[in-house]
Amino acid sequence: MKNVLVIKSSILANSSQSSRLIDYLKSKISANIVEHDFGVNPLPYYDLDAATGTRGEPKTAEQQKAFELSNQLIGEVNKSDVLVFGVPMYNLGIPAQLKTYIDYLNRAGVTFRYTANGSEGLITGKKAVVILTYGGIYKDGLADLPKLYMQTVLNFIGITDIEFVYAEGIGYGSEAIEKAQQSAKAELDRIAETF
């Protein structure tokens, strides 16, 4: 049985299209699941104490807490086989809650390192499923920034096997939402068969 790490980042709780799609995927698989909903339970803001604590020797209680939190989150990734991200588009970017998670996750010498040939990701052998929910239609266009960001940041730490699932046009009303959900669910059905 696979170990799956689920990351929800929407602030919309039960109204979240990305969280609904994650729940749909979960209903289709048999796996050991660890889940975070950072819209409901956000991480502490990645501030100077967090940056200092995760880059060297923590010197204060706040820095130590950030160091331990980062270690916990990285440990969850290392124990997982598959990572599932719910990524709604907010103002053409990713949610702040998700960016904070990534800030805790990306650590030089732990999840990536710099070499003479450039950066090298240290988290390998993982698969990621990124569920993108957009109010408009942006797939493969210049404004498809959440996909570009997630692909780049996951590749940076070594995760290169990534599947992107889109639910687009959800800002156009109930019929568009239903169409987007059905299209995304069909993709998730295919992905669930690989678990």
Image: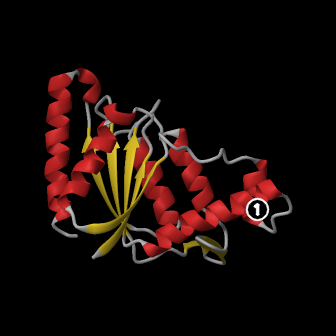
Tell me: 107 left or right of 47. left
Residue sitting farthest toward the top: 173
x then y, percent, for residue 187: 17, 53
Its colouring scheme is secondary structure
Q: Quadrant of the C terminus?
A: bottom left
Name the kind of residue labelled 1 in the image.
Gln
Q: In the picture, residue 175 is in which quadrant? A: top left
Tell me: 107 left or right of 14. right
15 relative to 59, above or below: above
Residue drawn at (31%, 29%) of the image: 136
Residue drawn at (20%, 30%) of the image: 177
x then y, percent, for residue 30: 22, 67
Q: Quadrant of the N terminus?
A: bottom left
x then y, percent, for residue 12: 40, 32
Q: Which residue is mark 1?
A: 64
Tell me: 186 left or right of 118. left
Residue drawn at (32%, 42%) of the image: 18
Q: Is residue 140 visible?
A: no
Residue sitting farthest toward the right: 59
x then y, percent, for residue 132: 33, 44
Near mark 1 (Cα within 10 A), the count class, few <14, some 14-19 or many ≥20, is: some
- Number of numbered labels in the structure image: 1
Residue drawn at (78%, 52%) of the image: 49
Q: Is residue 6 visible?
A: yes
Seen from the viewer's position, the closer of residues 130 and 79 is: 79
SS under mark 1: helix
Q: In the picture, residue 55 is in which quadrant? A: bottom right
Q: In the picture, residue 102 is in which quadrant? A: bottom right
